[in-house]
Image (spheres, rainbow, N blue to C red):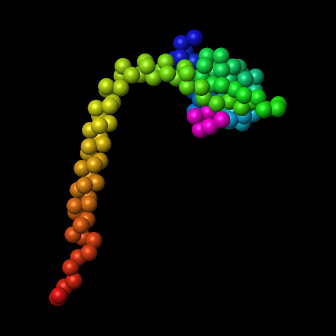
């Protein structure tokens, strides 16, 4: 399966969002996904299996519990594909950074005279 076939499903994207915050138990993932998408526990397990088998998630057993985490391996395929499009937003982000820096400099320059006004009559 192609990476975007995997990521095209909103349930799998949401699972990856949850895993991006750190390792999660299958039970915790299931609770969130069932509440948000109203899908069954077996359906959540199937989505976790697809993510695992396609290199987007890893799993480790600890007793009866299963802990899932993001596996960055397949995300690199997405990153390579997106790299072709970065030129469209990198220049704009650089320009935004420049404008933010100008704004900070301007506020510091304006704030210098206002912070400690000279006392009258001295």
Can residue 121 be seen here? The reply is: yes
Please give the range of residues in magenta: 18-23
Can residue 7 be seen here? The reply is: no
Query: Which residue is at 61% across, 16% downward?
Result: 54
Query: Which residue is at 70% across, 26% downward?
Result: 59
Please indicate whether residue 65 sits to the left or right of residue 59 in the image. Answer: right
Query: Which residue is at 63% across, 21% downward?
Result: 51
Hey, which residue is sitting farthest right in the picture? 64
Hey, which residue is sitting farthest top in the picture? 1
Screen quadrant of the N terminus: top right
The answer to which image quadrant residue 21 occupies is top right
27 is within the stretch colored magenta:
no
Hey, which residue is sitting farthest bottom in the picture? 121
Position above or below: 54 against 121: above
Closest to the observer, 113 or 71: 71
Position above or below: 118 against 34: below
Residue 86 in the image: state x and y as whole percent: 35, 26
Screen quadrant of the C terminus: bottom left
User: Exactly how many numbered labels are in the figure?
Assistant: 0
Closest to the observer, 19 or 14: 19
21 is within the stretch colored magenta:
yes
Hey, which residue is sitting farthest left in the picture? 121
Please indicate whether residue 100 sits to the left or right of residue 63 in the image. Answer: left
Query: Which residue is at 58% across, 34% downward?
Result: 20
Residue 26 in the image: state x and y as whole percent: 73, 31
Residue 114 in the image: state x and y as whole percent: 24, 70
Position above or below: 65 against 55: below
The answer to which image quadrant residue 14 occupies is top right
């Amino acid at each position: 399966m192609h990476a975007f076939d995997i990521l095209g499903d909103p349930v799998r994207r949401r699972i990856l969002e949850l895993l991006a915050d750190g390792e999660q138990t299958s039970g915790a993932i299931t609770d969130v996904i069932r509440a948000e998408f109203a899908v069954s526990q077996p359906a959540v397990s199937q989505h976790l299996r697809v993510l695992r088998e396609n290199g987007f998630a890893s799993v480790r057993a600890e007793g009866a519990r299963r802990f899932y985490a993001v596996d960055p391996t397949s995300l690199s395929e997405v990153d390579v594909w997106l790299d072709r499009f970065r030129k469209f937003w990198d220049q704009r982000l650089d320009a935004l950074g420049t404008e933010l820096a100008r704004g900070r400099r301007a506020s510091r320059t304006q704030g210098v005279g206002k912070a400690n006004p000279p006392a009258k009559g001295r």
